[in-house]
Image: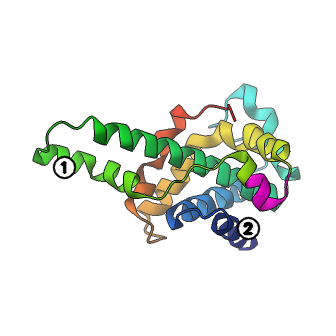
């Protein structure tokens, strides 16, 4: 789709790892799918957040792609910080720990996923306040659902992404709105 191609080009311009691009494409297409298939507010949005659902209909594909990249780069950055902490706290290397830390090792070996809003502004030419507004109002309240879509895409084998994608949704509760 055009949105997937746009998201992929933006991810490439930001020098994001391929896994991050796959995740951002999954998020942006899920946003578009959610908005086109349902005129009703989904159950996973809390009542106080429901007013923002209609706002994304007015957002351009460019804003949706940029906000999706912000969501994914933030989640990936969190996962990489967690991986670094987990691996630095590992004292011994028993068989059980090796299995447990395999996912953290994969996150730790990835190039950095984190990007600042200013990087997205430079890449897209969109004002950072617009990117942040789209993210804050539309994607952040649905972050668990959208990151879960990345996990489901990985589990269905739709993409040959790496195993980092299967646990990216773990970052959702740790994501704040400060940027």
Q: Residue at x 21, y 50 (%)?
A: 99
Quadrant in the picture for the N terminus: bottom right
- Which residue extends farthest top? 48
Q: Position of residue 27 (x, y in %)?
A: 62, 56
Mark 2–mark 1 distance (CA, rounded to whole Å): 39 Å
Q: Residue at x 63, y 47 (%)?
A: 71
Q: Is residue 154 visible?
A: yes
Q: Residue at x 59, y 51 (%)?
A: 72
Q: Is residue 35 visible?
A: no
Q: Residues within 10 Å of mark 2 (few under 14, many from 20)?
A: some
Looking at the rendered structure, the secondary structure element under dot 1 is helix
Is 41 positioned to the left or the right of 129 in the image?
left
Q: Residues within 10 Å of mark 1 (few under 14, many from 20)?
A: some
Is 122 positioned to the left or the right of 71 in the image?
right
- Is 124 in the magenta? yes
Q: Quadrant of residue 109?
A: bottom left
Residue holding disc 1 = 98
Q: Earlier in the sequence, mark 2 or mark 1?
A: 2
Q: Residue at x 74, y 42 (%)?
A: 138
- Residue nearest the observer in this picture, 176 or 147: 176
Q: Is residue 56 above or below residue 4?
A: above
Q: Position of residue 129 (x, y in %)?
A: 84, 42
Q: Main secondary structure of the magenta part?
A: helix
Residues in magenta, as a range: 120-126
Residue holding disc 2 = 3
- Residue nearest the observer in this picture, 162 or 41: 162
Quadrant in the picture for the C terminus: top right
- Residue nearest the observer in this picture, 173 or 88: 88
- Is 160 in the magenta? no
Looking at the rendered structure, the secondary structure element under dot 2 is helix
């Amino acid at each position: 789709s055009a949105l997937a191609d746009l998201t992929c080009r933006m991810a490439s311009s930001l020098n994001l790892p391929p896994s991050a691009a796959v995740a951002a494409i999954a998020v942006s297409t899920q946003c578009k799918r959610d908005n086109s298939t349902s005129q009703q507010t989904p159950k996973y949005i809390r009542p106080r957040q429901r007013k923002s659902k209609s706002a994304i209909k007015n957002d351009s594909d460019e804003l949706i792609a940029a906000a999706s990249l912000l969501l994914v780069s933030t989640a990936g950055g969190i996962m990489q910080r967690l991986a670094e902490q987990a691996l630095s706290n590992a004292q011994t290397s028993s068989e059980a720990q090796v299995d447990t830390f395999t996912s953290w090792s994969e996150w730790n070996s990835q190039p950095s996923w984190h990007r600042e809003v200013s990087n997205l502004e430079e890449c897209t030419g969109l004002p950072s306040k617009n990117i942040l507004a789209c993210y804050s109002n539309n994607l952040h309240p649905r972050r668990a659902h959208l990151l879960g879509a990345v996990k489901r895409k990985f589990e269905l084998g739709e993409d040959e992404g790496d195993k980092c994608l299967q646990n990216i949704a773990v970052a959702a509760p740790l994501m704040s709105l400060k940027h």
